[in-house]
Structure formats: structure tokens, C-alpha cells
Image (cartoon, grey):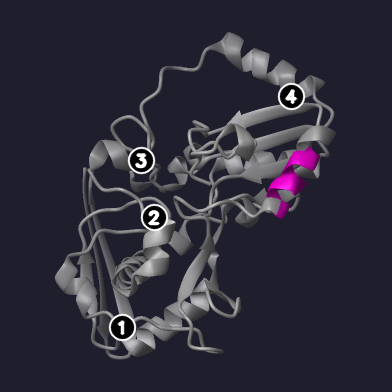
Amino acid sequence: MNFRWTLRAAKDRWLVKISWQSSRGSSGLFVPPSPPLDPEKVKELQRFITLSKRLLVMTGAGISTESGIPDYRSEKVGLYARTDRKPIQHGDFLRSAPIRQRYWARNFVGWPWFSSLQPNPAHWALSNWERLGKLYWLVTQNVDALHTKAGSQRLTELHGCMHRVLCLDCGEQVPRGALQERFEALNPTWGAEAQGLAPDGDVFLTEEQVQSFQVASCARCGGPLKPDVVFFGDTVNPDKVDFVRRRVKEADSLLVVGSSLQVHSHRPREEAPDCNT
């Protein structure tokens, strides 16, 4: 699987060019291999859903791979299987301006692709369950906004959302699309070619490309900006955790979709002192 993504400025507009080399369509690039469906397992799931009256669903990265977003752990196609690269750490982002520069340069290139992705049938099915009164609450570990795009409203984004940006100093929140326009204005002649995709809108760039990228700061106070997401090494807001726990207690059944649960977001913090979130 080869991937190339080019972003460059040309005559007051930004041009994006993607080239894929794969035996599958782009939406299937990051879908891990799986055995054929077992009809009996399908019937078992159908019975479970039918009997549920207050169903809580928790989703993870695996539900979005068919929309074209890579995950971390899937066999052969996840980030850890394809590369030796690791996701950004919360503490590193806070401490280091060069790391923030690298993050935003890569995110700037990846944003047009990431923000254009659309829900797949699994997202639409969960939204439909909500509309029919079957789904009581939806909790997602994903930051891609695909559940929102599919129309889900009874939703908690446990790890935040890439479509929002926060100032680390004053807390000002702005849409990610508005920040993209500011980046374009600050980098009118900058261009880059990414050599690979990572989860959550990240791409791979060379250090030479990164070093010439100009990073925007908060328009209100001049402070550093961060996407409104929980990076590895950070913790989920305790109020949000308590809110989800109350929804779990109110539910009569729990369905986990597309998550290995290896980030331990589902466990009380006192049981998982070394958890990532």
C-alpha cells in the first residue's frame, strides 16, 4: 500500500492532490482482514438488540476504518503494523513549541482529507437506532465527528473532536475549519508532500517541510492552540467520565463496536492507574 498526498499554494488557492496505490478502493485501505460472517452470530446479535430496551453503545476506531480512517492496532493495516511511529504525547505537545509546530504542519496537510470523510453504514445504523428509540446513549472514543455527521445526538465524544480547537491559555474555542484559513494566510507559499497517513488527521512529513511552517496562535490572547481532543498521556475530563457512568447505570445493555478497549477508557481510573486517557 503506497500513499502520497500533496498540498501546495497556487494563485491564491490551495491545491490538494492525492494518489493511492492499492488493490482496494481508498475507503477500504485500512479495513483489517476478517473471516466471513457467521449467520448464527448475526442472529445472536439481532436477539441481543431486540431484547435491549435502553441500549448504550460504545464505539472505537474500528467503526471508522471503512470511512477511510486508519486505526492504531488493526493487523496489517493499523499504524503500529505499518510503521514504527507513535502518536503524539500530551506532555510533549504542552512542553515543546517545535513539537506543536510539527503537529500543526502535519495536521494542516491532512485536514482537507480528514474533514471530507463521510459516515459509513455502521454510523448510519446507530443514528437510525437512535431515531427509532432503540439506542439510549452513544459513547465514542473517536474524534472524527462521523457520528455527528450521521445525525447522532444522544452522543458523548469521550476523547473530544478534531473539528474544534482550544487555546491552552484562555480556553477560547474555535472551529478547526477557521484555523485552516488562518494557516493558509500565514503560509502563502508553503507546500508539502505527505508520505503516509496516520489516525486522526495526521500525515507524515519531513523535518525540512515542518521547519518552514508558520503556526497560528490564539486570536484572542496569543496563546498556543491545541485540538479539542485527549492526546495519549492525557486524561478525560472527570465530569464527562461521571456523566458517562450515569448513562451506563441507566442502560440495561452495553454493545461495544469497533474498539479493542485497550486504551482503558471504559475502566474506572482507580482500576487503571496507567491508562492513556
Q: Which residue is mark 1?
A: 214
Callout in the foreground (4, 1): 1
> In this picture, is 15 found above or below 66?
below
Magenta region: 239-247
Image-based side of 63 in relation to 53, left or right: left
Q: Which residue is mark 4?
A: 49
Say which quadrant the N terminus sits in. Answer: top left
Residue 256 appears in the figure: yes
Q: Are marks 2 and 3 in contact (CB under 8 Å)?
A: no
Around disc 1, counting alpha carbons within 10 Å, would you say few (fewer than 14), some (14 to 19), or many (20 or more)?
A: some
Residue 23 appears in the figure: no
Secondary structure of the residue carrying numbered label 4: helix
Q: Residue 89 shows which numbered tag?
A: 2
Q: Looking at the picture, how far across and down is residue 220, in whole percent?
A: 56, 89
Secondary structure of the residue carrying numbered label 2: loop
Q: Looking at the picture, how far across and down is residue 164, in whole percent?
A: 56, 68
Q: Looking at the picture, how far across and down is residue 269, in whole percent?
A: 61, 39
Secondary structure of the residue carrying numbered label 3: loop
Q: Are marks 3 and 4 in contact (CB under 8 Å)?
A: no
Q: Residue at x 56, y 45 (%)?
A: 141
Q: Which residue is mark 3?
A: 30
